[in-house]
Image (cartoon, grey):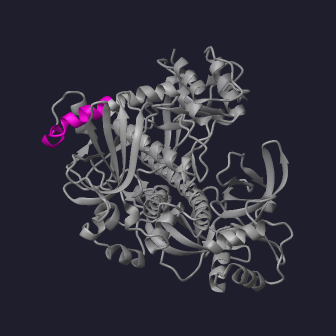
Amino acid sequence: MQAKNIILELLKKDGLAFKRLDNLFYFIENTYGIAYEEVKSDFKKLEKDGLIYKEQKDKYVVVPSGDYMRGTFVGNAKGFGFCQIDNSSEEDVFIPANMQNGAVDGDRVIVKILSKNGNESDGQVVSIFKPVKSVAGVVEKVGGNLFVEPDNTRIPFKILLIKGGLRAREDDRVVINLTRHNGKFLGVVTEVLGKSDDVKACELAIIRDHQLYETFSSEVLEEANALPQKVTEEQKKGRLDLTDKVTFTIDGEDAKDLDDAVSIEKTENGYILGVHIADVGEYVKYDSLLDEEAYNRGTSVYFPTSVLPMLPKELSNGICSLNEGVERLTLSCIMTLDENANVISHQICESVIKSKARLNYTNVYKVLCDQLADEKTESVKEELKLMHEISKKIQAKKAAAGSLDFEIPEVQFVFDENGMAVDFTKRERNDAHRLIEDFMVLANQTVAKEYCDNKIPFLYRVHESPRKEKAENVIEYLKGLGIKVPALPDNITPEYYQELIKRCSGQSYTETVNKVILRSMQKARYTNQCLGHFGLALKYYCHFTSPIRRYPDLTIHRIIKEVLHKKTLGEQRKAELESFTFEAGEQSSLTEKNADKCEREVDDLWKAYLMRDKVGQEFEGVVSSVTNFGIFVELPNTVEGMIKVEDLPDSGFLLFEKQLKLKGQKLSFSVGDKIVVKLTASNIYTRKIDFEFVRFIK
């Protein structure tokens, strides 16, 4: 890691060039005392990760810098493409068809900006540093050859199958290993998923197109299996022993990776709230195979019937999971609160706990509502009531600070014993869920503040304020609904957005407005700069509470443990951590984005599957968005479908983007309008649902 920092610093200097790379490596070895092979290895890794680029002979540049940016290529069926720049709020860079350098959708690329006009820019792909390796699709026969038609419509060409892989037949849904040769794309079949109309094969194809896998390599599993499955006496030395405290977990009924437990005590002047998080860093050491795998995956990915874990089950469900009745190593954030739930002091320490109960949201909510729950939950009834009391106070404080709570529903599927979806509805979110969310946010905030105040390199979860033009569009839309809107301030605050939400509450269009406001906001991301969290109205925030399933949490756990043991960090070590937290933030943001997209697509697949037998039926819905090619309509069960502009009962439509309105000669459709639609098609291959307009609902 030390060599990487030095290489980057040297290459940032203008005019630095070496006739041969060997000269650079020897220079670093002789000047900084780092072995030649280590320097060479780190240089290759920087090049592989797209952090440096050979601009011309004998000259490398750091990426991003100057006109060079790093990002993900997004293809388009029409031939052109875009590059989504890593961790940037800027608009995507437009890439003309003749400037793509052979890039396909999903490739990680370096682009050179050719021109810029306001927020819009054009560029060209100069390097593909991480090409897409596998593609899912359906086998077709053309002439005497077999081709794969990619499921991903952003790859606008068929891929010729060549010998060397598994045998596949026409109409099979397969995964191919993509190879590139002299500008041509060839494929070797690595998996046969099933027939093209098999919904489970379609689900697995989506997962593979996102380069996600449920299995781990034998080397990673060997390392996981070598870990102890019980806490040893040696490991407990020096830790705060909390095994006699009443601690418990609260999770969904089917959860297996339990990474947070809570405890509570009432004091004379307030409370002592303990948030105890699985000490994954004790088992997953930096630079181990397990760590490399966790870094590459970045996050666990959750689907309706399965989980792709970040770590093997020996850790995620085993020694790291805070299972009931067994000792587990934890990092605890123990907060002393006053009567108003303000944190007046705290302790962050290594600890050991023994969870007294594995609770679920359903039974906890019963207790909070004074209903009879199961015996296990009733046994900690007093603690739960106390926690509920604190949670309500935290929520009142959050609301006063401007925290935004959109209450946008998520889908929950019901599956039969064969793993086939039979129904779906909106996922419940009640006070039991909010209680745990409140405590985790409080711990995350407390940990972030300590490490920011002490100027220790760290990884933060940041959510920056909306861009002004996005906020102006929201204002225009709300005015179109007849809502009196306060003037937009120069500095957009959470309190201002909270006021907008309040003014729209209790209306038929409330949920739709919330979505419009949410879309105007920037995406949350990970970075080593403490930039605050707009949505939570917090100055300090990080992700500390889920190290089993999120790499950022594991990253900061190891920093916390290092500080607890060493007390102070040298300048060199701080520089190393600055570099690593930057890289980990970039990687974690990318993997989170990929996982979120994959989860949405799988949900859309099952929605399309369940709607197939309802073609011809009418439904009430709400216009959720408008475009120049049609309108999208969302049903109460979260299904979203489209009515193409040519199928609308009018003509001459114009899109008024700021007002979120599609206006024809006689009719106009605005986001939030309630209408009746008829389902005309539900396609599991494209995951698209088509509606026909029936009438407006007054």
Residue drawn at x 35%, y 40% is: 436
Residue drawn at x 65%, y 22% is: 668
Whether 551 is among the magenta residues is no
Is 33 located above or below residue 563 in the figure? below
Q: Please identify the quarter of the rendering in which residue 3 is found.
A: bottom right
Whether 382 is among the magenta residues is yes
Tally of numbered discs = 0
**Along the line of sight, which residue is nearer the eye, 378 or 143?**
378
**Along the line of sight, which residue is nearer the eye, 600 or 531?**
531
Image coordinates of residue 6 in percent, x first then y, are 69, 71
**Along the line of sight, which residue is nearer the eye, 633 or 475?**
475
Image coordinates of residue 52 in percent, x first then y, are 72, 69
Q: Please identify the quarter of the rendering in which residue 484 is found.
A: top right
Q: Quadrant of the N terminus?
A: bottom right
Q: Which residues are magenta?
A: 374-389
Residue drawn at x 36%, y 35% is: 337
Image coordinates of residue 28 in percent, x first then y, are 72, 79
Is 108 located above or below residue 647 in the figure? below
Can residue 610 be seen here? Answer: no
Can residue 666 be seen here? Answer: yes
Image coordinates of residue 265 in percent, x first then y, are 26, 38
The secondary structure that most of the magenta stretch takes on is: helix
